[in-house]
Image (tube, coloured by chain):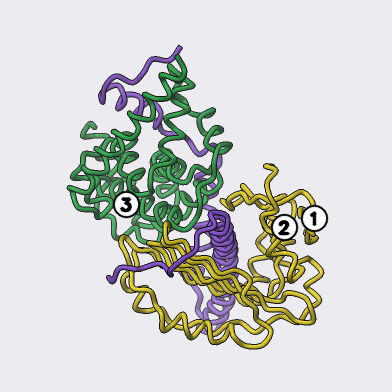
Chain colours: A green, B yellow, C purple
């Protein structure tokens, strides 16, 4: 990130803190993809994800003074999104199929192997909430295990364990799927 | 919809849980104890108390033009209250015997009958389902469920149509139930 | 035809591909801002009376604004309460159905026996 860009981002946050709604709206636009994607991958439901994402930004608006910098903002958004999503998941059964497929359809990446990647998405949905959160933060948000541990308030060893086991499980089940598809 | 054995017949037949049960006077809400000790140790607590006025408020925020919302609105038309206490734990937990006994004492009152008592040693799961009956019609439901990492009590005041709840399968995250075709309209099977 | 996943690196590559960011679609930010407008406490100061000479006129203007703010605040709170009630209702129905399903599965496994043991915390 260039110095000018960082400065501009800092200005946006400062303006939002000063009560400028347009600046806050710009912050929403800047971070909406990340927040919504995390919510969608966790909840597997487009409407629930939008609802949760809106609530996260609403909570941000109410607690903006607690955010000290752009970097802290990213951390704050990930933390709140994941905690809210995990809360919901623990209470509600997952929705299957349709919403996630729709999300796949609008995803901008063109899958090289659509069948296998569809299977991978389905397997991700089967991961327990905490493990899924760890995987998302690692591979969607590109956080390292220390940052994941801080975001989820989880011991570092637990994060590493979730990553290790989840990857092993995904690999094992994907290998079985791949064999079946050949 | 999957064809299956009569999943809810044993639940529907004895008490005729049908839409017309809205005619019965609702049972009084159970006096649910505090589960503070459980809540303190739970990683997740759900505490929902929706009385008539809050149900009305919620219903007002269901969009009648949305089929799912409309179905939900229809489902809760006969409800006077819905109360949920649910606690989730990372590991085992101490079964709140004393508090559950307080609830069971209320469920021993005239009008309440226990429909289902399940114990699964394999799954370490116990579920009891009670229904309150007034003049042959159900006007209340209580569920006490204990699983390895979760304890839940549900109390529904008023009538709820299980067939209609079943029709919400897949909506709002309600998992799919299996009902025999003859039960889909809410009438009990034979 | 699909190839099997050969190693962790390949799996990680696929995960990154599958977990590409998804846009919530047009109108998301405006919808958030609408909720912000509805739910945020209005910190607007009373309209400036400009060069108002009379304290009475100023007080009257402040009263009108205050009444408006209170009504707006009430409406905003009602909106939030309604949404929260709806959310709780849906969750309560989910939990109810989940436990009914649990009973069904327990009955159908035809498992009986001693009550479940729970380890102490």
In this picture, residue A164 sits left or right of residue B21: left
Q: Nearer the viewer, mark 3 or mark 2?
A: 2
Residue C43 position within the rendered picture, expressed as x and y whole percent measured from the top left: 45, 67
- For residue A170, which quarter of the picture? top left
Crowding at mark 1 (Cα within 10 Å: few <14, some 14-19, many 20+): some
Q: Provide the secondary structure element on which disc 1 rests.
A: loop
The structure residue drawn at horizontal position 41% and vertical position 84%, both measured from the top left corner, is: B98
In the depicted structure, whether residue B113 falls above or below residue B177:
below
Residue A98 position within the rendered picture, expressed as x and y whole percent measured from the top left: 58, 37
Q: Provide the secondary structure element on which disc 2 rests.
A: helix
- Disc 3, disc 1: CB below 8 Å? no
Q: Chain of mark 2?
A: B
The structure residue drawn at horizontal position 29% and vertical position 33%, both measured from the top left corner, is: A168
Alpha-carbon span between mark 3 and mark 1: 45 Å
Q: Chain of mark 1?
A: B
Crowding at mark 3 (Cα within 10 Å: few <14, some 14-19, many 20+): many
Alpha-carbon span between mark 1 and mark 2: 7 Å
- Disc 1, disc 2: CB below 8 Å? yes
The structure residue drawn at horizontal position 55% and vertical position 75%, both measured from the top left corner, is: B49
Q: Which residue is mark 2?
A: B163
Crowding at mark 2 (Cα within 10 Å: few <14, some 14-19, many 20+): many
Q: Nearer the viewer, residue A72 or B44?
A: B44
Numbered badge on residue B185: 1
Q: Which residue is mark 3?
A: A79
The structure residue drawn at horizontal position 44% and vertical position 25%, both measured from the top left corner, is: A117
In this picture, residue A87 sits left or right of residue C10: right
Confirm whether circles 3 and 1 share one chain. no
Q: Which quadrant holds the C terminus of chain C?
A: bottom left
Q: Residue furthest front?
A: C113
Residue A20 position within the rendered picture, expressed as x and y whole percent measured from the top left: 41, 53
Q: Residue furthest top?
A: C1
Numbered badge on residue A171: none
């Amino acid at each position: 990130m260039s110095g000018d860009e960082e400065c501009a981002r800092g200005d946006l946050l400062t303006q939002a803190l000063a009560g400028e709604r347009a600046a806050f709206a710009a912050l929403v636009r800047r971070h909406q993809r990340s927040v919504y994607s995390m919510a969608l991958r966790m909840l597997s439901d487009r409407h629930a994800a939008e609802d949760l994402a809106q609530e996260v930004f609403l909570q941000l608006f109410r607690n903006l003074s607690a955010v000290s910098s752009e970097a802290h903002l990213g951390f704050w958004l990930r933390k709140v999104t994941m905690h809210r999503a995990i809360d919901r998941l623990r209470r509600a059964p997952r929705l299957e199929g349709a919403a996630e497929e729709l999300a796949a359809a609008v995803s901008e990446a063109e899958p090289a192997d659509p069948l296998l990647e569809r299977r991978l998405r389905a397997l991700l949905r089967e991961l327990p909430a905490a493990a899924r959160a760890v995987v998302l933060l690692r591979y969607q948000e590109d956080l390292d295990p220390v940052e994941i541990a801080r975001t989820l308030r989880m011991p570092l060893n637990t994060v590493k364990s979730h990553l290790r086991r989840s990857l092993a499980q995904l690999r094992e089940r994907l290998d079985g799927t791949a064999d079946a598809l050949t | 919809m999957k064809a299956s054995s009569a999943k809810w017949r044993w639940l529907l037949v004895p008490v005729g849980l049908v839409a017309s049960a809205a005619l019965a006077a609702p049972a009084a809400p159970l006096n649910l104890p505090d589960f503070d000790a459980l809540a303190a140790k739970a990683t997740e607590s759900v505490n929902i108390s929706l009385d008539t006025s809050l149900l009305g408020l919620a219903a007002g925020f269901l969009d009648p033009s949305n089929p799912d919302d409309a179905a939900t609105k229809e489902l809760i038309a006969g409800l006077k209250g819905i109360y949920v206490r649910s606690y989730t734990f990372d590991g085992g937990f101490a079964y709140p015997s004393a508090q559950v006994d307080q609830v069971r004492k209320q469920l021993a009152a005239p009008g309440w009958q226990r429909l289902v008592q399940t114990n699964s040693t394999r799954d370490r799961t116990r579920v009891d389902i009670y229904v309150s009956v007034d003049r042959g019609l159900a006007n209340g439901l209580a569920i006490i469920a204990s699983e390895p990492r979760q304890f839940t009590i549900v109390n529904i005041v008023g009538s709820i149509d299980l067939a209609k709840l079943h029709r919400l399968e897949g909506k709002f995250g309600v998992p799919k139930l299996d009902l025999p075709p003859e039960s889909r309209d809410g009438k009990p099977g034979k | 035809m699909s190839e099997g996943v050969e190693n962790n690196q390949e799996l990680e590559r696929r995960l990154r591909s599958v977990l590409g960011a998804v846009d919530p679609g047009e109108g998301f930010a405006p919808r958030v801002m609408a909720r912000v407008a509805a739910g945020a406490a209005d910190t607007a100061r009373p309209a400036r009376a400009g060069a108002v000479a009379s304290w009475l006129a100023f007080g009257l203007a402040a009263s009108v604004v205050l009444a408006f703010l209170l009504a707006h605040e009430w409406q905003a709170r009602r909106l939030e309460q309604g949404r929260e009630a709806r959310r709780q209702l849906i969750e309560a129905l989910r939990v109810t159905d989940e436990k009914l399903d649990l009973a069904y599965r327990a009955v159908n496994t035809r498992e009986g026996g001693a009550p479940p043991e729970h380890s102490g915390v």
